[in-house]
Image (tube, grey):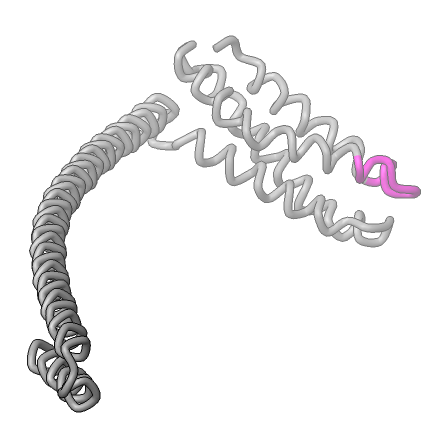
Amino acid sequence: MRWLVTIVVIAIIAFLGYRYFYTDEGQQVAEQVEQTAEEAAQAVEDTAEEATEAVEGATDEAADTADDAAQSTEQTAEEAAESTEQTAEEATGAVEGAADETAESTEQAAEEATDSAEQMAQSAEDATAALTVGGVNLGEEIGTTVSDATSALEGITDKASAEAALPSLQAAETKLDELSADVEKLPQQAKEALASLLDDSLPELKDLVSKVEGMEGVGEVVKPTLDSIMAKLDAWGKQPA
């Protein structure tokens, strides 16, 4: 930039010297112009130096700002990474804790279910032993008889089917008559066990009896037999628990 200013000054001086070379006034003007040109050149140079210093200062500040931003970003990234790692560890711990609790709960539930099944099996075994008289398991015999009577009643839809089912019902009545004497020999605890066994099957049987006896032309065929069957079962099912 300085050389450009110098060329401009030289050109101005040459022009003015050419114009005023032979006059004092021309020489005076030339000197003034030269001085003005030098001052202008110095001002331009000073301005250029100030601008250069300003640019360098701004560059340094920008570099410092960039360094600060980089450090801040790095610190933020490290903090985020640490937070993420901590959160992952906490989540892992929670999952592992829940898994352990679930495993313990499942194991406990399995143990309780096993104990319950064993107790039920033991209770069934005890009931079977208590209901056995003369080598005959009265619980099984009565349960089979009730099941046979239920099946016979389910097949009745009219008078003809009632007459066809009557022999099965009469066989059930006869079987219960044969078991009556042995039932009376049972101790009170065994009678209570028998009543518990009948508690599940009697409601269904009673519903079927009421339905069949309400059919037109059917009640008169099966009612006497059904009354005999239900009288025995009701008496055995009403033992105090």
Q: Is residue 143 left or right of residue 72?
A: right
Asked if residue 205 is among those painted magenta in the image, a careful observer would answer no
Q: Position of residue 162 (x, y in %)?
A: 80, 48
In the image, the segment drawn in magenta is 211-221
The answer to which quarter of the image holds residue 25 is bottom left
In the rendered image, residue 218 lying in the magenta stretch gets the answer: yes
Residue 52's spot in the image, x, y percent?
9, 63
Q: Quadrant of the N terminus?
A: bottom left
Residue furthest toward the right?
A: 216
Near-viewer residue (85 or 111): 85
Q: Is residue 190 above or below residue 113?
A: above
Which residue is located at x 57 percent, y 41 percent? 147
Instruction: Return the residue found at the far front.
Output: 23
Residue 140 picture quarter? top left
- Decide which of 57, 120 is in the foreground and name it: 57
Q: Residue at image x 63%, y 20%? A: 234
From the viewer's perspective, is residue 43 above or below residue 230?
Answer: below
The residue sitting at 13% across, 57% down in the picture is 54
Q: Residue furthest bottom?
A: 18
Residue shown at the point (9%, 45%) measured from the top left: 75
Residue 224 locus on image (x, y percent): 78, 31
Front-most of 35 and 225? 35
Q: How many marks can you see?
A: 0
158 or 5, which lies in front? 5
Left or right: where 122 falls relative to 133: left
Instruction: Return the x and y of residue 24 as percentages of the image width and height.
Output: 14, 77
Q: Is residue 230 left or right of residue 92?
A: right
Q: Is residue 144 found left or right of 78 in the rendered image?
A: right
